[in-house]
Amino acid sequence: MDVQMHKKLSFLSSLSSSSLNMFFPHIFTPLILFIYLATFASAATLLPPDEVEALKQIGKTLGNNDWNFSGEANPCNWAEGTDNNVTCNCTSSTFCHITMISLKSRNLSGTLPTEFVKLPFLKVIDLTRNYLNGTIPPQWGCLPQVTHISLLGNRLTGSIPKEIGNISTLQHITLEFNQLSGALPPELGNLSQINHIHLTSNYFTGELPGTLAKLITLTEFRVSGNQFIGKIPNFIQKWTNLKKLGIQASGLDGPIPQEIASLTNMTDLRISDLNGMESTFPRLNNMTNMNRLILRSCNITGPLPKYLADLTKLQTLDLSFNKLDGDIPSNFVNLSTVEYIFLTGNFLSGLVPKSMLQYGKNIDLSYNNFNPGPPGCQQKNVNLFASSSNGNPSQVSKPLGIVSCMRSFQCPQNWSSFYINCGGQETFDGSTKFEDDLDLGGAAKFIQHGTNWAFSSTGRFFDDDSQDSWISTNISRLSMRNFELYMTARLSPISLTYYGFCLLNGKYIVKLHFAEIMFTDNETFSSLGRRIFDIYIQGKLEYKNFNIEKAAGGLNKETIQTFTAVVTNSTLEIRLYWAGQGTTGIPSRGVYGPLISAISVYNPDYVSKNKNNISVGAVVWIVATVAFVIILLLGILWWRGYLPRKDTTEHDLKGLVLQTGSFTLRQLKAATNNFDVANKIGEGGFGSVYKGLLSDGTIIAVKQLSSKSKQGNREFVNEIGMISALQHPHLVKLYGCCVEEINCC
């Protein structure tokens, strides 16, 4: 029977699917299904039970609650190359073995499992960008075959266990963008096969262990954004295979050791924000493969070395915020193919080479001492803001003054304020209008906007494969009152300056509006970013290591930082600078640097109305003058009798009632048939006279005071008083009067 079935399967395999359907229309589908299920079940049984059990426990510890391995969920059958993948090696005729676990960007919220050590064939652990917490288990030191460990972008704390140095097979360890701390264990020097060590954006302290000198297989070493102490060690000269070195804001002191010249395979060198001694430019002329050279804020003095123009593979040159002086070498014309050149914030002088102005791609020469050139702070792709005779802003604590590149600009008037919705549309906060700020910006860009402000932006977001953007749009719900101000924000990778000009001199209030809108406010890896930068006002450092989230008490919340500034030369400078701190890869690479939502600048001694500045004293004088004129006019009208003198009139008329007698207006209306014209018998100076008949039959004459009469109440009272005093048989007797509302009779 088995032989016959084997023959049938062999026969079936030699036929096309159409032929199979033709000859076996009823048995083909269930037969194939039986073969598939049998094969799947067989594969599932090939994974050793202890590895299956370990994998279940790993999923539970990581917080991967939807992990199960029943039916089609066999982990060895998951598609390879995905971010959610368990890879098995099934080349053995008896068992499969798990060799890789990759669970990236799953927002797993558990801890790191010790059960990884129960997978003896495991080579790769990749838990990049999750929400894992806790510490790195010391038990991982027993991982027998692991070559790659990536825990980038989690909430891990504690120190690196010294046992990690026992993983002799380890080639690549990435612990970037966590909250790890403590000193690096000397045992890391035992990793004889290591080629990548990435420790950026943590809280590591202490000196770099001397045992790291043994790591001669290293090709990448990144320790930026930490709190190390001591100098950059000379032993890095032994890492002759090194291609990428990152020591930006690491806490280490300069100078850059001259021994770095031995690293001839270097393609990407990034050192920035060094403390310590000044030094001359390091010898890098043998690094002919250099693609990206960043030596920013490293206390480098002296002239620019000519050999930089001979680095033919160079695409990025950032030497900003040093103390370089002298002219730009003439052979820098060879750098016309370099994509980005940042020489911002030095003491460079002389003439700016015409080749740079004509052919430069993205060149920033702002904040230098060059000879003034043609007017204009942006010449094609070259930023020349404050590039002439202003010095290095990191060393000068005084206002810029009017920059030479704007010397041809004539102020139409002087203002006492400006308001900017950074990166956004024009909007209002109450009655205050915030001007739009919609220009996309750029790596080396100066933009003059409106009537009395401009901005200068320096830098490119490196390691970001997507198109650079210098404006961010909110991705979460905002609940603050004036949320329109925080829907967008302007970004910069290195330095962002807002420059006010044509201002009245005096004391100003500067309010900087911030909200962290690029990180999410939830329990995901996107909430784990840390944005840190410095704030300068009028060249003075006002806030070191400013963190928006901490200042606001959370993400997507507003914080307004208020400063005072004195304007003495009609200009005001607000500069934000990234000093290398914080994360650079959460939620994705290239997210870092200054971010600002809105700016309010005003002189409290002035108010703005229709763009005309009027002092508070002037407003008080105007209001007082108007009030005096109004009171004077009312007094004249009252004196001339055009306004009623209510108190006097009422007093006189009430006195008249007491002297004579009183009638109600209703009585008189009834007697005169509501002052009917038919009963009118005469007209006098005070008004009309009507014939009336009282209810008791008495015939009376009623004189009604007209509101149009040119004679006043005083004259009316005098006449009534005089008549009442007369006694004569031929005179009409005065019976009384009526005083109600505005009627006098």
Image (cartoon, rainbow, N blue to C red):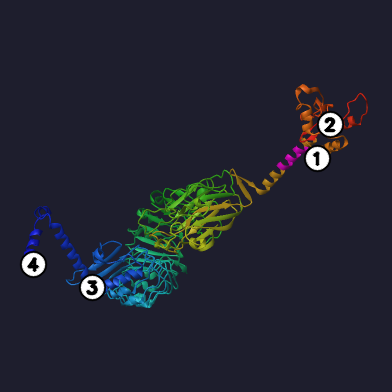
Dominant secondary structure of the residues highlighted in magenta in the image: helix
Residue 48: numbered disc: 3
Residue position marked by numbered label 2 in the rendering: 716
- Going by the image, does 29 lie left or right of 352? left
Element at label 1: helix
Element at label 3: loop
Do tag 2 and tag 3 residues touch (Cβ < 8 Å)? Answer: no
Residue 3 screen position, x and y as percent: 6, 66
User: Of discs 4 and 1, which sits in the foreground?
Assistant: 4
User: Of discs 3 and 1, which sits in the foreground?
Assistant: 1
Residue 2: numbered disc: 4
Asked if one can make out residue 8 in the rendered structure from this viewpoint, the answer is yes
Other residues around mark 1 within 10 Å, as few (<14) / some (14–19) / many (≥20): few
Alpha-carbon span between mark 1 and mark 2:
16 Å
Does the magenta run of residues contain 155?
A: no
Upstream in sequence: badge 3 or badge 4: 4
> Which residues fall within the magenta stretch?
626-635
User: Hey, what amino acid is under mark 1?
Assistant: Asp
Residue 647: numbered disc: 1
Name the one closer to the observer, 712 or 244.
712
User: Hey, what amino acid is under mark 2?
Assistant: Phe
Upstream in sequence: badge 3 or badge 1: 3
